[in-house]
Image (cartoon, helix red, strand yellow):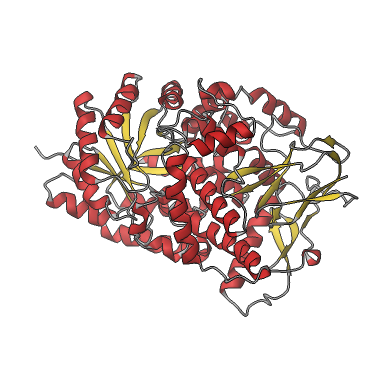
Amino acid sequence: MEKEVKFSLVFRDMWQSAGKYVPRVDQLVKVAPAIIEMGCFARVETNGGGFEQVNLLFGENPNNAVRQWTKPFHEVGIQTHMLDRALNGLRMSPVPADVRKLFYKVKHAQGTDITRTFCGLNDVRNIIPSIGYAHDAGMISQCCLCITYSPIHTVEYYLNMAKQLIDAGCDEICIKDMAGIGRPVFLGKIVAGIKKIKDIPIQYHSHAAPGFNMASILEVCKAGCDYVDVGMDPLSWGTGHADVIAVQAMLKDAGFKVAEINMTAYMKVRSMIQEFMDDFLGLYISLRNRMMNSLLVGPGLPGGMMGSLMADLETNLESINKYKAKHNQPLMSQDELLIKLFDEVSYVWPRVGYPCLVTPFSQYVKNLALMNVIQMEKGKERWSMIADDIWDMILGKAGKLAGPLAPEIIEKAKAEGRTFFNDNPQDNYPDQLDKYRQMMQEKGWEFGQDDEELFEYAMHPAQYEAYRSGKAKADFLADVEKRRAEKNAGGMNTKEPQVLTVDVNGQPYRVTVAFGEVDPAKLGGTQAAAPTAQAAAPAGEGKDILSPLEGKFFLVKNAQETPVKVGDKVNKGDVICYVEAMKTYNAIRAEFSGTVTAICVNSGDAVSEDDVLMKIA
């Protein structure tokens, strides 16, 4: 009897692996019937991780998007699955246990069938609680082995991990080859070994960029894999996934039973994807992410992260070249920065204990490497800027690292008075739902159907507040207009700041959009008549606290923290605010003791390197 292999369309990850955003809910609802009409998918990845945050960045409600997007697939019996970051839930930083439990209840009620849980450290202590949460909510628990290639990550390592998860009651195993660097024979041995432990459903997820994944798909299917994740044109290959047409043809020729593809419907979906890209999503997609690149075999960076990496590089390249221009040094090209980054990732990764390069730890390693490159290009020392979330990974607060830390990292931790942690990571993050309930009641906000608004606020507090105020949508629409103007040069005078008016649910916002290097004094910022809009404190006397990098300014990163106010006394070394960059909150500390005399930007505002954030006298 022919072995059957079923296909899952990773529609969410296709977009995330290409660029910054996924389609809006109206676009998702439009494309769903054509995906169904293709007739070849047993499963569709609908949400998870970046999907939730992207909707908040749009200024849209992600709960509404999940409900509408999953509904048509349910009606025809196609299973929906989502990505869960275990201890980190749907965000980049750890989540309290009560929020994790509510997460499962909410997502099942919204229409998600399968939760694909992974820990970037492959620490089963972070994954196993999610098995129980999924079962309690009525969901299928699919647990991941995050694949990487190192002296530590052997076949035996992965089989031992799989056995622990199976013994803990998971329903399925996902071989999450997020960077596509798993060698084909190596992966086949893992799948065959798992099937000997238990004949459990196995799903293979892989990215195409390094060039291994078609051979890997064939090997894992020969070893007994049941489901294969696929993409489709024009968002297949490159940093994305193998196209369903090629995978289907290869497996069919190899003697596997596979579903037929309705090519008329395929072309409909293909046309719609291009339509969405032409609308605005293509403004956030680097052409480099559409290409295969064997250089990725070395650093092993995941496809889902490469989508945003090129945008990050553009921003940081500008910062580096501003410095070089001021110091009469030759400017750097993007290719030069990319190679320096890849080399630095290869240097950093083993020294911070070989965390699997998957969210959030791929971002942590990449961010740390990029910060090292930036600092060294500006004449500073390596390791001179390490975000607190990255320290938590290094210190063991997020889970056990696979390998040992380099002596230079241990010495730096000791020099800064940081302590290592060996107990259960969840113990570091106490329950918080009651606090968020109180905050919502004080604001007059409803908890929402199935407590979904409470969940969203607790999971993404800063982004949720920006969404509720209308600021998120105003900033997003302004950024789209800026990018369109840059693309269509000549349609707008790009040498001077432009004042645009954007409409957010009937509320007009005046937004100043700057192109290139401009005088900050000419910028008016984002202004809104909405009562929730917060005015920046007037500038007072004192020394400037400057932003060390480009990103978004926040006074706090969660409800446990109390924001600094004008008039507060602070001590040298105190955390006074954050700059969120590349999905990581970078703590800004007081450089001296004194009194805060001015807070010069609003929470959620974009800031550039060397912008004045606060004044302290």
Q: How many labels does the image show?
A: 0
Q: Can residue 543 be seen in this view?
A: yes
Q: Which of 568 and 26 is in front in this view?
A: 568
244 versus 364 height, above or below: below
Residue 480 makes an appearance in the image:
no
Q: Quadrant of the N terminus?
A: top left
Q: Whole-percent x and y of residue 20?
A: 51, 55
Which residue is depicted at the point 20% across and 36% down? Answer: 189
Q: Please identify the quadrant where the C terminus is shown.
A: top right
Q: Is residue 82 above or below residue 39?
A: above
Task: Give coordinates of residue 203: x percent, y percent.
Answer: 29, 38
x, y percent for residue 578: 69, 43
Is 373 situated left or right of 224 in this image? right
Judged from this view, the residue extending furthest toward the left is: 1
Instruction: Report whether 174 appears left or right of 533.
Output: left
Residue 190 sits in which quadrant? Answer: top left
Q: Which of 244 and 424 is in front in this view?
A: 424
State the image quarter where residue 122 is shown.
top left
At 64% from the left and 35% from the top, the residue drawn is: 457
Residue projecting furthest to the bottom: 490
Residue that appears at 24% across and 40% down: 187
Taking depth in this image into account, of 263 and 125 the one nearest to the observer is 125
Drawn side of residue 207 relative to residue 349, left or right: left
Q: What's the residue at 87%, 52% (across, down)?
A: 539
Please say if 397 is above or below 341.
above
Residue 62 picture location, percent across and down? 56, 43
* Quarter holding residue 98: top right
